Amino acid sequence: PRTVRLSPNFFLLQTLPPNSLTQPSITLTLQSSPLGDILIHPRGRSAINCVSCLWPKSADGTVLIPYNLSSGYSQQQVSLFQNSLQEFHTLTCIRFVPRTTEKDFISILSTGGICASFIGRIGGEQQVYLDSGSCMSRGTIQHELEHNVHRSDRDDFVTIMTQFISPDKIGNFDKMDTNNVGLEYDYGSVMHYPGNAFSNTSGQATIVPKPNPSIPIGQRIGLSPLDVSKINRLYQCDDSGLLLNSANGTVTSANYPSTYPNNSTSVWLIRTPSGQVSLQFIAFDVQFSTDCVSDYIKIFDGPSKASPVLLDRTCGMGLIPQLISSTSQMLIEFVSDTSITATGFKATYTSVQCGGAFYAPGKNFTSPGYPAAYSPNMNCIWKITAPAGYKISLTLHDFMMESAPNCIYDSLSIYDGADTSSVLMVKYCGTKSARTFNSTGNAMMLNFISDKSFQYKGFLASFVFGESLGSTIHKQM
Ligand SMILES: *[C@@H]1O[C@H](CO)[C@@H](O)[C@H](O)[C@H]1NC(C)=O
Ligand SMILES: *[C@@H]1O[C@H](CO)[C@@H](O)[C@H](O)[C@H]1NC(C)=O
Ligand SMILES: *[C@@H]1O[C@H](CO)[C@@H](O)[C@H](O)[C@H]1NC(C)=O
Ligand SMILES: *[C@@H]1O[C@H](CO)[C@@H](O)[C@H](O)[C@H]1NC(C)=O
Ligand SMILES: *[C@@H]1O[C@H](CO)[C@@H](O)[C@H](O)[C@H]1NC(C)=O
Ligand SMILES: *[C@@H]1O[C@H](CO)[C@@H](O)[C@H](O)[C@H]1NC(C)=O
Ligand SMILES: *[C@@H]1O[C@H](CO)[C@@H](O)[C@H](O)[C@H]1NC(C)=O
């Protein structure tokens, strides 16, 4: 093995047949490996490490990158693409905006059978290939978009196993001349290639992290905290957002348990590697004001402040009920005004594989996998919250779980309130016919538990909100 310093962007150039990418003014060269994804401008590498590779900064501190999405994506893929932009918008000053007439822009194309980008801003229309068949995951979309934002770089030491790399692929491992903005090497970067990149021997790694070969590399879940820091340093963005991307962790207000600063806004984006985010507050003490106009916390069910609200402006003291996002992303916003501060908050988060929190009706939900059998050892919580003054009418349309006296093995418990301290309306198991349960307040909680043996199809439930359930619903939402 040969030890080299390298950047995550080691690549090999291969000229494709001229008609394989139709670009009238620029002859593109790019590698054919599905792992390689850098498009090279004919000006060559020397044109890459330059200040003008950055996109210009607007007077308001944001950096606009106009994009045009080709028509080759499904509605679901367009949503995924837009969702993938949100982490940049929430955590950095980069703003991908639909192109109107801007001269410099990125053109997102669904053709080509590849995932590939230029590096930095090259001027004019620059193409980004996101094949609609193989490139549409958040991590891959963010990887390709991040190429357009900057030069990926950062030095470190990994061992390159040249004995598994064919001679014509060795150029992929050239170190590029780069600007590492003073940050440590990031094994967890969404820009890093996986350990088997360009290997010519099945099962043999070409990139081995040092000193610990088992450090994971090549993730495509999404931006890493250092990817975010890097963009923010390079573009000198105000740094008020923190990305938390572990499966579990703790989040506290600044200086906790000392007083949080006056006049500040912070956001934390929690993105667990899989599943959904469950957030449990341990402490909460935020300056009280009527309608929380002064200091407050607000929590969103998704990656941006445009996502549905999980917890609206909250202030004062006391405990906030457990929150569960409907996806792997949850955003916390914390705002303080210019006077009076308190100790703030501390919360822990974990990734859960099932469950949910609903704030609007009209959504059916099921046990995991329904109508296929649920998995063993599940513990899922769903919380339904209606607006103040409304009640919840929950219907179980279909129900089949393992039967046992007192439902000691598998069960669904329905509580008339936000948590397990509320009145237990029913604990169900076995096979039941359709039935409706009405809350007395504006919250309801369901807890689904399965043990290690005997799995069935589970349940299908739906719910509506009404002002006065049990008699007549005056106003149904
Ligand atoms: C954007 O893409 C659409 C669909 O491919 C195309 O018709 C349109 O001309 C493009 N617009 C711009 C501004 O490039
Ligand atoms: C893999 O690469 C090594 C080193 O370049 C080379 O000696 C070997 O023949 C290659 N193996 C295959 C199967 O191409
Ligand atoms: C948190 O995650 C780590 C691994 O990332 C795991 O070892 C640990 O058990 C988890 N803790 C909880 C409470 O889930
Ligand atoms: C609050 O902070 C902003 C910028 O962070 C600053 O412009 C403003 O003067 C501050 N206000 C007070 C009252 O300190
Ligand atoms: C916030 O401002 C108030 C006066 O407006 C001051 O008494 C307090 O010490 C400040 N808190 C912090 C943490 O700076
Ligand atoms: C929810 O499930 C019920 C029963 O299967 C069905 O009648 C209803 O259309 C479903 N509603 C939605 C919004 O999917
Ligand atoms: C719950 O409310 C619905 C809607 O008003 C009503 O039809 C139903 O009879 C109520 N069920 C019970 C058990 O009170």
Image (tube, rainbow, N blue to C red):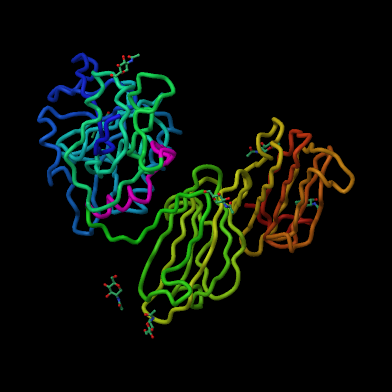
313 vs 69, left or right, is right
Residue 44 percent coordinates (x, y):
12, 30
Residue 396 drawn at (x, y percent): 75, 43
Please say whether residue 219 is one of the residues in the magenta stretch.
Answer: yes
Tell me: residue 106, above or below residue 294. Answer: above
Residue occupying image coordinates x 54% and y 56%: 349
Residue 328 appears left or right of 371: left
255 is higher (above) or lower (below) than 395:
below
Which residue is found at the position 69% from the left and 40% from the top? Answer: 367
Q: Residue at x 74, y 57 (%)?
A: 439
Boundaries of the magenta span: 213-234
Q: Nearer the viewer, residue 417 or 272?
A: 272
Q: Is 211 above or below relative to 416?
A: above
Q: Is residue 79 visible?
A: no
Quarter in which the N terminus is drawn: top left
Q: Within the image, what quadrant is residue 401 found in?
A: top right
Taking the spot 30% from the left edge, 51% from the top edge, the residue there is 184
**For residue 67, side relative to residue 374 (left or right):** left
